[in-house]
């Protein structure tokens, strides 16, 4: 938060607090922010005084909330921004996934899906359209091999949604471990429509 704005809010709160006739101490980060002493005569509260108290409390908690939000959002880019800048660009808290292709130019039913991977050998992939002709069936769970650029079975994929456009693909032994490709079929040469 801008320190000038902080000082202005603090000053305003002190002025409003001076009008309040109660005993109260408000602190921010352990430093007294508002200290109000009761009057000796014990005056009655008036509507403007009550409004001042309410405004002081609302502004105080607003100041605390803004300081809390500002401390959570600080980023290296924000720390290096110009003092006169009117806006601060914030970096995303979660990096966007990097799109990759399956290893060794592998294809799924002749298509090159775009994938992300967090674990070596497991890829979360998408394709524009499932390659089976006009159909109305749910293909969730459908499995098929992936073939590398030398026409050898390098793994397989499983459809995750009804239209088969989201897939989880496994490369190498992981495809066998996830029951997509038989152990004896992994590495075999393939000809025909599945060929890469």
Image (tube, grey):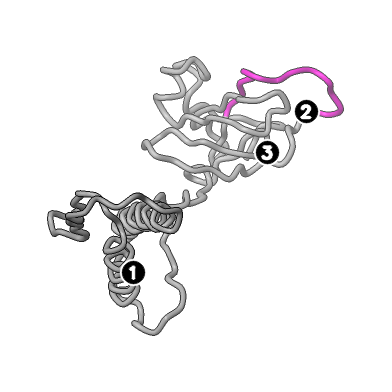
> Residue 55, image x and y in percent?
41, 56
Image side of residue 41 versus residue 77, left or right:
left
> Residue 63, image x and y in percent?
34, 59
Q: Was residue 140 drawn as part of the magenta stretch in this picture?
A: yes
Q: Which mark is residue 110?
A: 3
For the residue pair 52 and 137, the one nearer the viewer reads as 52
Q: What element carries label 3?
A: loop
In the rendered view, tell whether residue 129 sits above or below residue 101: above
Q: Name the residue under label 1.
A: 12
State the image quarter where residue 16 is shown.
bottom left
* Label 1 – label 2 distance at C-alpha: 70 Å
Q: What element carries label 1?
A: helix
Mark 3 vs 2, N-terminal side: 3
State the image quarter where residue 1 is shown.
bottom left
In the rendered view, tell whether residue 69 sits above or below residue 188: below
* Label 1 – label 3 distance at C-alpha: 70 Å
Q: Which mark is residue 132?
A: 2
Mark 1 vs 3, N-terminal side: 1
**Where are the magenta residues, as a range?**
133-145
Image side of residue 32 versus residue 104, left or right:
left
Crowd rating for badge 2 (residues with CA inside 10 Å; few <14, some 14–19, many 20+) = few
For the residue pair 65 and 112, the one nearer the viewer reads as 65
């Amino acid at each position: 938060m801008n320190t000038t704005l902080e000082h202005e809010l603090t000053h305003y709160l002190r002025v409003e607090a001076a009008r309040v006739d109660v005993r109260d101490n408000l602190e921010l980060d352990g430093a007294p922010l508002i200290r109000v002493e009761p009057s000796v005569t014990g005056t009655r509260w008036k509507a403007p005084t009550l409004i001042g108290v309410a405004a002081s409390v609302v502004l105080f908690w607003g100041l605390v909330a803004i300081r809390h939000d500002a401390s959570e959002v600080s980023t290296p880019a924000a720390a290096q921004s110009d003092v006169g800048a009117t806006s601060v660009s914030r970096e995303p808290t979660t990096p966007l996934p990097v799109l990759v292709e399956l290893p060794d130019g592998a294809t799924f039913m002749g298509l090159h899906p775009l994938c992300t991977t967090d674990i070596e050998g497991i890829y979360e992939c998408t394709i524009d359209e499932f390659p089976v002709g006009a159909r109305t069936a749910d293909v969730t769970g459908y499995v098929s091999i992936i073939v590398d650029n030398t026409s050898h079975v390098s793994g397989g994929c499983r459809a995750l949604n009804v239209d088969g456009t989201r897939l989880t693909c496994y490369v190498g032994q992981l495809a066998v471990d996830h029951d997509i490709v038989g152990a004896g079929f992994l590495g075999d040469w393939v000809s025909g429509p599945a060929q890469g």
